[in-house]
Each structure stands twice: as C-alpha cells, then as structure tokens.
Image (cartoon, rainbow, N blue to C red):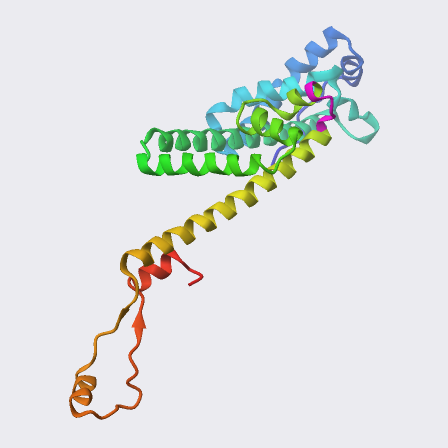
Amino acid sequence: MTGSPPSSPELDTTIIMNALAGDASALSQLCVYYQPQVLRVSMRAAARAGFAEDGHEVAQEVWCRLLDRACRRLQYFSPCRGSFGPFLRLITWQQALSIVSSRARRGHRDRALESEALVEQSAPCHATVVEARCLARRIVEVASLQLDDVDRRLLVEIYLGDASVQELAPRMGSSTAALYKRSQRLRSKLARAARRLVADERARRCARQLGKGGLRPRAKSARMRRASRTGRAVAGSAPRVSSIAGSGFRRMCPAA
C-alpha cells in the first residue's frame, strides 16, 4: 500500500550513509532523489484522511520531521537489514498518518469552538443570568465563611480572578503540586456548598408553593353526597386530600 514498485533503483548506499552522518551535499542528493516517493506516500495518507488537497503540505511537514534533530528518525536505518527506499516509505507513511490525524483533531476542535461561539452569541434569558449570578454570589459568601486564609486567597485569585496555579504558587511560597491539590479540595468545598444552596432553594420554592394554595379537600362524589343525605356511611368513602399542583408540585419537589 505504501511502497513503490520493487524495481525502483536505490540511491548509492555511500551517499545515504554520508547524508545520515551530516554531509550537507549528500543529504541534498538524498532529498532530491526520494522526494517523489515521499510526496506519493504523503498524498495517499492525506487522501485517506480526507485531506487530498493538502498532500504537498503533508509531504513538506514529513520532511521537516525526518530531518529534525540530525535526521534522528532516519538514523534507525541499517544497510544490513534492507534497502533505504522501503524503510523511508514506511517512516513517511507513519509520519504522514500522524500529521493528518493531528489536522483532523485540530479541525474538529475548531468546529467545536465555532459552535460554542455561535451559542454564546445568542442572548440568554435575563432572568436566568440574574438568578445564576445571585446563586454564584451566595455560594462564594457561604463558602468564604468556612475557608482559611489560604483557601480564601485561592478563591479570589484563581476562581474569581484570572491567575493560574503556576503563577500563584511562587507568590504564596508553595509548590505547584501542593497548591494544585489544595485548589482541587477547594473546588470540592464549593461544589458541596452549591449543592446545599440548591437544595435549600428548592425547599423554599416548595414552601412558597404550599403557602399560596395549601391543601384542599377533594370534591365529594355523587355517591358520597347521596350517602350524606341519607345519613348512611359509605365504605371506603373517607375524604382524601390532594396537593395543590399535583404533578407540577412533584416536579419542583422530587423528594416529596
């Protein structure tokens, strides 16, 4: 799949070894001689990943990788194990697949960022924004009462500010790893405070809903009205009560 016809001639082994040893003239001859093979393999890899129009760019990036750090990747070649052409085509195929895979991931990430930008452009509901900001402010206020000085500074510098753990660690005289663990514990504290506040807010909404309508008795059925007129008791006719909002109330208070 990645190879060329077996009858293709090889460059002189002496020139190849001199090129790998750092001879600039020999390296130039090697690049010119094997450029068509590298380009052909790179275009196949690009076409396989859907980047057929980028074949030449992939080939150039492959050469950059092959020649990087004194041809480090090509130093694995040994004449006693075979010819240089098949070895170069295999290395080219591997590097070209790595390049196009990286481009595919980068393109997917860019599309995701574009979609997020489109979502952010739509104006959110003002009431929702205000409610979220109020809840966040209350979370910070409640959590601050339970924090020591170090955690409070982390809250202000990292979560409310724009500092990073790496920037803050030297100023606080702590290692990055220790400060990162402390930041993780602070995040857990904030999450617990948020859950408590959300639960309390849900309970308050349920209480307000109860206060507005209360519990009302269910209307008597015709059978019960007849029994009351005749003064006879009807089996299983004890009055039942229902909540004011029925399933709506249960949606607000799932635990009810």
Quadrant in the picture for residue 187: top right
**54 left or right, relative to 72:** left
Residue appearing at x 32%, y 57% in the figure = 211
- Relative to 185, is 40 above or below? above
Residue appearing at x 58%, y 30% in the figure = 155
**100 left or right, relative to 30:** left
Residue 67 percent location from the top left of the image: 69, 16
Is residue 125 visible to us here?
A: no
Residue 157 percent location from the top left of the image: 58, 24
Quadrant in the picture for residue 175: top right
Residue 208 in magenta stretch = no
Quadrant in the picture for residue 185: top right
- Relative to 215, is 224 above or below? below
Residue 175 in magenta stretch = yes
* Residue bounds of the magenta highlight: 171-176
Residue 163 percent location from the top left of the image: 58, 22
- Taking the view exactly as shown, the residue that stands out farthest to the top is 25
Name the residue nearer the viewer: 27 or 172: 172
Which image quadrant: the N terminus? top right
- Relative to 247, is 172 above or below? above
**233 left or right, relative to 130:** left
Which image quadrant: the C terminus? bottom left
Is residue 137 visible to us here?
A: yes
Name the residue nearer the viewer: 213 or 92: 213
Please give the count of numbered marks on the rendered protein. 0
- Taking the view exactly as shown, the residue that stands out farthest to the right is 80
- Relative to 230, is 122 above or below? above
Residue 183 percent location from the top left of the image: 64, 33
Name the residue nearer the viewer: 151 or 12: 151
Residue appearing at x 75%, y 15% in the figure = 70
